[in-house]
């Protein structure tokens, strides 16, 4: 493919001549003969610092934000390499999105479960569905572990091209605020956008809540067909106002087009009556918790837009029996109630604690922490939620990254003590020991709730990442301590 063929949808100045391009990459380590290297500015490194290395490896041309003297290959000068990369990638891979129906789900909480439910309904309707999200990418029968919620734009276009090749018809994907702000979805137009909710998170990156909202709203300013909006959320109406597409609303408390009533929560799931513009249907969801009512309503709204019948929607919702790391029950031979969940925001933690309370007459023993190098403002808020809703709290490490684990725990502790000065809590920075302590001090009437990491199979420290899976750790602790 010729270089100029890739540049039709971007603003650029070409310094040099048109040349053939065999591949595209933004990672200088992956450059090969004939590559187009895109110099993207990252948080820690700048791709411009690797231009001569890329050329030495065989790059045929480069995309830059400033001309670099004596480079020896054509330079495509653009205002923003990140924005340009998505459009260039789309052109290189044959604009795969035009052959797919793409549904994007954004919000603070519930994205993963909502995408799983949408995928299940569409498959029940007979479509081949791809999935891109926090846990994994799914193309047909193949699944790959995800490295980030929403891939970089070039990687995303490559994935979409693979999905087209595999005969995929629909793509359901999580769209993070980071992705929207960093233009990872540049070159991609969504057919349907879903808004789940907005609560505090990622303010280390977005700085203000208004910026966080504005990042999420970018998804709805480019939709082609329909926006599916949670009208019970405090920001639902504001998000709806940002949409260029028509709205289908969902909720429980507020008037909405898709609603749930007569909700009955149990340890095995949630039953409710679905009310929609196309009639009513009894739903017997195998995912428990009031929050999963909202996740399922979001999925219903998206699939009604695509023409799914209420019978198909019912079968699709009820086919999902679990989502990894999302209020996941850990079976064990001792009958100890253990739940692992990804909740890592104040609102997410509150949701799972309230659900756990509905499921037990005993105590809730909570193990949780907060990520290092991330939004510090949410830490005391999570401490307050723990103090108000858990019976016993063990504050521990999550992914401390470059921060001192005890410092993170102290931030959480301040919120806990402000809400409940005499509350029952303990700080155990070693997450493995914290889980052991929770198991040792729980009995069969209690629920041990381990929050924050969910499906993750690692723990990140300043200079290393080690294998760590809450699900494995709690099973090992039960076997060791219950013998």
Image (spheres, grey):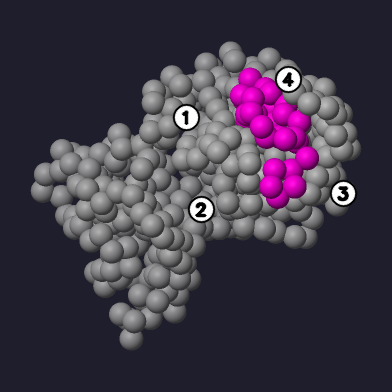
The one nearer the camera, 197 or 377, is 377
Sequence-earlier tag: 3 or 4? 4
Direction from residue 117 to residue 261 in the image, left or right: left
In the image, which is nearer the foreground, mark 2 or mark 4? 4
The one nearer the camera, 16 or 207, is 16
Q: Is residue 285 visible?
A: yes
Q: CA distance from mark 2 to mark 4?
A: 45 Å
Q: CA distance from mark 4 to mark 1?
A: 36 Å
Q: Is residue 73 magenta?
A: yes
Residue denoted by label 3: 165
Sequence-earlier tag: 1 or 3? 3
Residue denoted by label 2: 326
Q: Which residue does the image show at 78% across and 34% down from the upper left?
A: 90
In the image, which is nearer the foreground, mark 4 or mark 1? 4
For the residue carrying disc 2, how many other residues have a C-alpha within 10 Å: few (<14), some (14-19), or many (20+)?
many
Give the secondary structure at mark 1.
Answer: loop
For residue 12, the mark is 4
Residue denoted by label 1: 198
Q: CA distance from mark 3 to mark 4?
A: 30 Å
Residue 79 placement (x, y as % from top left): 63, 20
- Find the residue positioned furthest to the left: 422
Q: CA distance from mark 2 to mark 3?
A: 31 Å
Q: Quadrant location of residue 336?
A: bottom left
In the image, which is nearer the foreground, mark 1 or mark 3? 3
Q: Quadrant location of residue 249?
A: top right
Callouts 1 and 3 close, C-beta under 8 Å: no
For the residue carrying disc 1, how many other residues have a C-alpha within 10 Å: few (<14), some (14-19), or many (20+)?
many
Give the secondary structure at mark 3.
Answer: helix
In the image, which is nearer the foreground, mark 3 or mark 4? 4
Residue range (magenta): 55-84
Q: CA distance from mark 2 to mark 1?
A: 18 Å
């Amino acid at each position: 493919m010729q270089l100029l063929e890739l540049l039709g949808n971007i603003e650029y100045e070409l310094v040099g001549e048109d040349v053939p391009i065999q591949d595209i990459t933004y990672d200088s380590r992956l450059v090969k003969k004939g590559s187009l290297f895109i110099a993207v500015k990252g948080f820690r490194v700048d791709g411009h610092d690797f231009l001569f290395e890329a050329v030495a490896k065989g790059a045929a041309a480069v995309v830059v934000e400033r001309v670099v003297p004596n480079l020896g290959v054509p330079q495509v000068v653009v205002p923003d390499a990140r924005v340009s990369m998505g459009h260039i990638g789309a052109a290189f891979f044959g604009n795969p999105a035009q052959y797919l129906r793409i549904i994007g789900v954004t919000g603070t909480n519930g994205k993963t479960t909502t995408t799983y439910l949408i995928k299940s309904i569409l498959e029940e309707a007979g479509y081949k569905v791809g999935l891109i999200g926090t846990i994994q990418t799914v193309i047909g029968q193949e699944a790959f572990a995800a490295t980030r919620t929403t891939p970089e734009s070039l990687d995303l276009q490559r994935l979409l091209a693979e999905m087209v090749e595999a005969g995929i018809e629909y793509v359901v994907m999580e769209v993070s605020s980071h992705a929207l702000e960093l233009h990872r979805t540049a070159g991609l137009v969504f057919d349907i956008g879903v808004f789940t909710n907005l609560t505090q998170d990622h303010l280390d990156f977005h700085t203000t809540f208004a910026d966080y909202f504005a990042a999420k709203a970018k998804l709805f300013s480019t939709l082609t067909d329909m926006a599916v909006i949670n009208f019970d959320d405090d920001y639902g109406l504001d998000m709806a106002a940002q949409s260029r597409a028509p709205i289908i609303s969902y909720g429980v408390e507020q008037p909405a087009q898709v609603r749930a009533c007569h909700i009955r929560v149990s340890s095995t799931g949630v039953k409710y009556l679905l009310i929609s513009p196309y009639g009513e249907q009894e739903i017997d969801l195998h995912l428990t918790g009031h929050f999963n009512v909202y996740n399922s309503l979001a999925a219903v709204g998206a699939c009604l837009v695509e023409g799914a019948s209420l019978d198909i929607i019912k079968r699709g919702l009820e086919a999902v029996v679990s989502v990894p790391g999302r209020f996941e029950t850990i079976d064990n031979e001792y009958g100890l109630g253990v739940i692992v969940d990804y909740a890592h925001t104040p609102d997410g933690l509150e949701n799972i604690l309230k659900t756990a309370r509905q499921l037990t007459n005993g105590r809730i023993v909570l193990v949780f922490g907060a990520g290092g190098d991330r939004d510090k403002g949410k830490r005391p808020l999570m401490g307050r939620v723990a103090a108000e809703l858990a019976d016993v709290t063990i504050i521990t490490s999550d992914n401390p990254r470059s921060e001192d684990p005890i410092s993170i725990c102290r931030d959480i502790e301040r919120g806990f003590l402000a809400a409940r000065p005499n509350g029952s809590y303990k700080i155990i920075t070693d997450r493995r020991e914290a889980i052991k302590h929770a198991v040792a001090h729980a009995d069969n009437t209690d629920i041990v709730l381990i929050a924050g990491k969910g499906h993750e199979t690692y723990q990140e420290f300043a200079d290393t990442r080690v294998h760590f899976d809450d699900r494995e750790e709690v099973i090992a602790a039960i076997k060791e301590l219950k013998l």
